Amino acid sequence: MARRIIYILALTSALCFYALYPYWFAGYLLFVLVLLTPFDLILGLPGMLARKVALACPGMLDQGMDGTLTITTLVSRPFPARCIKLRLRETGDGFTATRCFKCGAGKGARYELPIDTAHSGVLSFKLKHIWTVSPLGLFSLPVRVNRKASVLIMPAPIKPLRVAALPRGVVFCPKPGGGFSEDYDLRPYRHGDLIRNIHWKVSAKVDALVTKEPLVPPPHSRLVQAIQWDTARERDLILGRLRWISDYLLKWEMPFYVKIGDDGPIVEVDDPADLTNYIFHVLNGTSRMLTACASLPPRFAWVYRVDARETEETGTEEKKAV
């Protein structure tokens, strides 16, 4: 706007100068100023139309952690626009805000916007249009870009109250049908056992036939179910406990199923990224996009319920077949 005002003042002054002193120099000056308008438009139009921007932010941030949304301008023409005006729409937990600012037009120019991580949830950023400015600043042109980025803000892991109900390690069981396994147990020989499974060294020491029984971890049927929260404080507490339990189980190499709320989908968690993706879709209201488990166990032999209770209550059931 300032450059437009300066140009109008300069053009007005040149016109008055030509009216008072109609010499060749005044006419030449007026002619040059008039030609600046089409020259600025023709020179800058390809770069203005080709201007692009990119949004980038971390996929997940811890609550209270510093994070930034990076806006990068992309240049593909020799005469790019002078600058870019942006209107960024930010959507979070029950609020929508719009931020307006300017970015430089240089190649690979970056603008970093701080992300508010005071509360857990999903923050979505949307950029529909940008306004590119011509090299001399006399014209601005809206360009549709439609860029989106989202970040999941997770509370730090919070140790739940009832850790005694958590398994302490993988329990092995005999492999159905026998066969080979890296893990095995020793037991007295029984009629029908294969000869190749006899542990000859141990048998010689105890003077009795001892056979190796192959062991495998049983098919997991563990479910971690979180209740639906009512407030932001309960959400922080429940998600923090859910994250702690997930880290604990995966540390012991115990995959599990997870469910949030009574009507939420059930997905299998084999690594931390599975839980992060699940919580992102639940908080973003797109849980229907999740791929349902191909086969669920007929019944869950171990169920752990995550709630927002502040104190431990006696007599609560943690292990239950469902």
Image (cartoon, grey):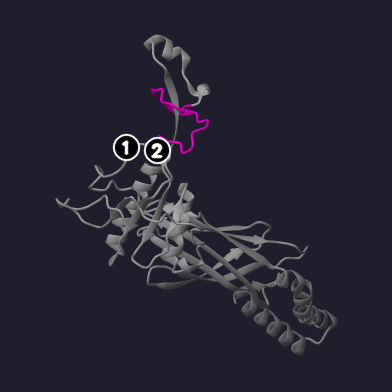
Q: For numbered disc 1, what is the local secondary structure?
A: loop
In the rendered image, the residue lying farthest to the front is 191
- Residue, x 49% and y 37% (percent of image)? 177
For the C terminus, the quadrant is: bottom left
- Residue, x 30% and y 53% (percent of image)? 321
Q: Is residue 82 above or below residue 219?
A: below
Which mark is on residue 168?
A: 1
Q: Which residue position holds label 2?
A: 252
Residue 285 in the image: state x and y as whole percent: 44, 69
Q: Nearer the viewer, residue 243 or 185?
A: 185
For the N terminus, the quadrant is: bottom right
Which mark is on residue 106?
A: none
Q: Is 174 in the magenta?
A: yes
Dominant secondary structure (helix, strand or loop) of the stretch shown in magenta: loop
> At label 2, which amino acid type do we have?
Trp
Q: Is residue 275 above or below residue 124?
A: above
> Who comes first in sequence, dot 2 or dot 1?
1
Residue 276 in the image: state x and y as whole percent: 45, 54
Picture quadrant of residue 25: bottom right
Q: Is 57 in the magenta?
A: no
Task: Calculate the distance from the C-alpha at mark 2 to the C-alpha at mark 1.
Answer: 8 Å
How crowded is the residue under tag 1: few (<14 C-alpha within 10 Å), some, or many (20+)? few
> At label 1, which amino acid type do we have?
Arg
**Label 2 close to label 1 by CB (< 8 Å):** yes
Any part of residue 152 in sight: no
- Residue, x 40% and y 56% (percent of image)? 298
Image: magenta residue range? 172-193
* 191 relative to 141 in the view: left or right: left
Q: Nearer the viewer, residue 217 or 120?
A: 217
Any part of residue 27 in sight: yes
